[in-house]
């Protein structure tokens, strides 16, 4: 039972989602909070000073930053955080290889002391960099693409910090993870104004802190839905024959029960679909009627984050209900087309 329940974290609807997207409290309360502030300030100041030197050294004839990157994504296919990263990579036409991680043994990431997915390994010349946490991966890559700074330098602007989550478990948090390290000209070119930048950051965090926590209670809402979800997980994931059987039946039962606790923990309504519809409509309202995407004529990082989270429900009853009973379908279809129309490079 415990082994199957462990495998259940594959969808990121519990293990993956709670680990990366959970709200945390500082540990210890005061020193960690101050450390986070000091660390963030230090690295921000350090970035401003170092970026001036980097930009002075950059040649106007430099190749596109993405042209020399070799990316490998370690993932669970049905994890919403991994889906976010794939949406970003696909939209930006970045070639990458995928390594599907066995959710029980996790031998594919035994090289890493960071034991969650997604993990992105970026080979840049002779230098290999490991990027952890979906939002850090996206922010670091976008900073690299826009500014041309090396990933080796960029990832130092997102320092890890130990913290305790709401359940008393030690987790790793990352400073500045929704912030792109751009100079004023680059930020102006990308966003047009501070309001757009602030809006993007706000809704990227909303996707991690709220939207992702609505997935598990909805896809495991009933025993029938839980079994259908695990049938999908087993089909798309990497399991051995025995693990697949345990995950599908015992894991589905375990996650059905766990989803009830998640509903209580996140103070969801008795009808968890109502929270899902409300979140979708809130997002649509924020995008508004005068632009196809929050990013304007093309998706920004918030669009890609929300789309990536919701995409893991495709093929399940919860997704069909969401499309029928909320106003999100037109935006979702536009996102789908935007991803599909990006040149395929992998």
Image (cartoon, rainbow, N blue to C red):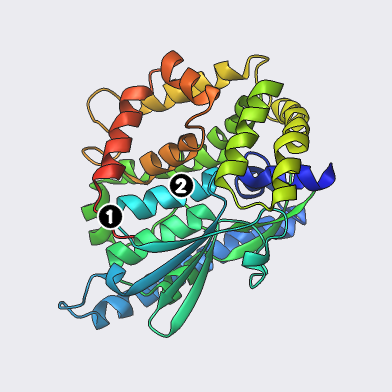
Taking the view exactly as shown, the residue that stands out farthest to the right is 1
Could you tell me how many numbered marks the image carries? 2
Left or right side of 246 for 41: left
Tell me residue 262's x, y (percent).
71, 31
Tell me residue 20's x, y (percent).
61, 49
Q: Can residue 181 be seen in this view?
A: no
- Identify the residue position indicated by label 2 in the image: 84
239 to 329, vertically: above or below:
below
**Nearest the eye: 271 or 324:** 324
Taking the view exactly as shown, the residue that stands out farthest to the front is 241
248 to 19, vertically: above or below:
above
**Nearest the eye: 66 or 287:** 66
| Mark 1 neighbour density, 10 Å: few (under 14) some (14–19) many (20 or more) | few
Taking the view exactly as shown, the residue that stands out farthest to the bottom is 126
Q: Can residue 33 be seen in this view?
A: yes
Give the mark, 1 or 2, whose residue is nearer the N terminus.
2
Residue at 65 percent of width and 17 percent of height:
269
- Identify the residue position indicated by label 1 in the image: 344
Left or right side of 199 for 20: right
SS for callout 1 = loop
Badge number at residue 270: none
Residue at 59 percent of width and 59 percent of height:
37
332 to 135, vertically: above or below:
above
């Amino acid at each position: 039972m415990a082994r199957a329940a462990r495998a259940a974290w594959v969808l990121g609807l519990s293990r993956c989602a709670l680990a990366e997207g959970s709200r945390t409290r500082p540990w210890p309360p005061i020193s960690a909070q101050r450390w986070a502030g000091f660390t963030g300030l230090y690295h921000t100041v350090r970035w401003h000073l170092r970026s001036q030197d980097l930009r002075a050294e950059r040649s106007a004839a430099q190749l596109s930053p993405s042209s020399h990157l070799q990316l490998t994504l370690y993932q669970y296919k049905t994890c919403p955080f991994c889906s976010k990263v794939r949406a970003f990579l696909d939209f930006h036409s970045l070639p990458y290889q995928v390594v599907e991680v066995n959710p029980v043994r996790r031998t594919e990431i035994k090289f890493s002391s960071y034991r969650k997915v997604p993990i992105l390994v970026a080979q840049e010349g002779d230098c290999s960099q490991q990027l952890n946490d979906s939002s850090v991966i996206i922010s670091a890559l976008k900073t690299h693409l826009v500014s041309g700074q090396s990933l080796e330098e960029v990832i130092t602007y997102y320092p890890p910090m130990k913290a305790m989550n709401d359940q008393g478990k030690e987790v790793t948090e990352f400073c500045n993870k929704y912030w792109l390290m751009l100079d004023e000209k680059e930020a102006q070119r990308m966003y047009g104004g501070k309001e757009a930048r602030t809006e993007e950051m706000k809704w990227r965090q909303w996707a991690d802190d709220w939207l992702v926590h609505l997935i598990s209670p909805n896809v495991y809402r009933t025993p029938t839905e839980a079994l259908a979800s695990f049938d999908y997980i087993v089909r798309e994931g990497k399991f051995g024959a025995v693990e697949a059987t345990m995950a599908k039946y015992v894991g589905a039962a375990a996650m059905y029960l766990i989803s009830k606790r998640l509903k209580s923990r996140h103070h969801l309504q008795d009808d968890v679909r109502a929270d899902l519809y409300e979140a979708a409509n809130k997002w649509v309202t924020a995008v508004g009627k005068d632009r196809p995407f929050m990013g304007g004529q093309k998706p920004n990082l918030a669009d890609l984050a929300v789309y990536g989270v919701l995409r893991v429900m495709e093929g399940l009853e919860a997704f069909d209900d969401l499309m029928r009973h909320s106003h999100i379908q037109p935006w979702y279809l536009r996102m789908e087309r935007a991803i599909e129309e990006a040149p395929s490079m992998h």
